[in-house]
Amino acid sequence: MSGRQQAVFWMAAAGSFLATLILFEDVLLPFVVGLAVAYFLDPVVDYLEERGLPRSIGASIIMGGFGLIVIATLLLIIPVLKIQFLGMAQGVAEGFGSLQESFPDALEDLQVIVGENALNEGKQALLGAGSNLISWILHVLGGAWRSGAAFINIIGLLVLTPVLAWYLLRDWDRLISKIDDWLPREHQNTIREQAKLIDEVLASFVRGQATVCLIMAIAYAVSLELVGLKHGLLVGLLAGLTSFIPYVGAALGFVIATVLAYLQFGESSMIILIVSIFVVGQLVEGNFLTPKLVGDRVGLHAVWIVFSLLAGGSLFGFVGVLIAVPVAAVVGVLSRFLLKVYLGSTVYSKTRSDQQDNLR
């Protein structure tokens, strides 16, 4: 197979992948979630298998334990979060209203400095950005709802996903071996090498970042509750669990917590304490947790992650958000490989005089 034929083949494979996402977007959610759960838990099942436990039994134990933890967590937290969410929404609205009433002079001074037209344009820009963000979130949530509803109802989704995850966990090594047998013999070692790099990137980011998010969610929630902030549990969990989007989770939690602290306490000392919690949290996350748990071999820039999440959510809804980081990892690894091939090729190494001689 010539180089051009190989390029056509891989382009056709990528096109088929995109076509599958478009055609089956409404029914892919349980498969994607099941695959993500299986990938996340596979190392634990491998550990049990190495200790002599049959893989099917190991998969059953791990999935059963994982399911019990998820169910118990949901039963304990959801009622509390529901109450806190309603109260927080009202509190944030009141807080912004209070801020607007407290600083009319500042707005008037700003209008004098920058001009009425510029101030109005700024307001419109902020409103437009907020509207776009809300539309994106609603699109993502709508995709999640459509994907669940396509499988009869949400209960069907919750039942099907664990079953798919168990089958994938049980047959994971067999599936990997079968895919390896399908690789073209000529490029088998190269593909294996790139697949290993992709797995390292995904393992470092997905498993490591999930651990970081969990730790930060608990740390923020406990800290905000200890200082007495109303709805601190919800704000902390929200800030921690969304920290996989670089800087967005901490910024979101910081803004909401500051507004709630101003509304509740009205004291600068308490507001400074709330700000300190997020500053310390970011320092710990950036200088200790992320380097230790995620590592420096991920190679996924924060801008690239944010772009992939926004693009995936806009194109394919909730399914797109779930596959955004894996696809970004694949693209990142393959881009570095292609750049390495280019830098080692004659196209790059030929000098200008060599190229002129070839033209003659």
Image (cartoon, helix red, strand yellow):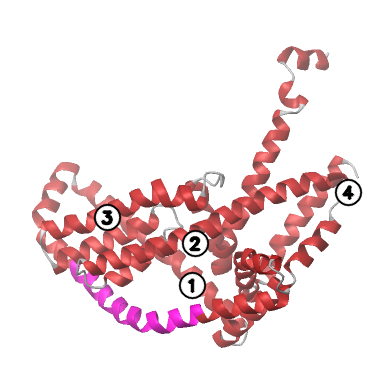
Amino acid of disc 1: Leu
Residue 306 is left or right of residue 153, and the answer is left
Of the numbered discs 4 and 2, the one sitting upstream in the chain is 4
Q: Secondary structure at mark 3?
A: helix
Q: CA distance from mark 1 to mark 4?
A: 43 Å
Q: Which residue is mark 1?
A: 141
Question: Which quadrant would residue 265 be assigned to in this image?
Answer: bottom left
Q: Which residue is mark 2?
A: 210
Of the numbered discs 1 and 4, the one sitting upstream in the chain is 1
Q: Which residue is mark 4?
A: 185
Figure quadrant of the C terminus = top right
Of the numbered discs 2 and 3, the one sitting upstream in the chain is 3
Question: Which quadrant would residue 4 be assigned to in this image?
Answer: top right
Amino acid of disc 4: Arg
Q: Which residues fall within the magenta stretch?
A: 69-95
Amino acid of disc 3: Lys
Against 125, residue 165 (above or below) is below
CB under 8 Å between discs 2 and 3:
no
Q: CA distance from mark 1 to mark 3?
A: 27 Å
Q: Which residue is mark 3?
A: 123
Q: Secondary structure at mark 4?
A: helix
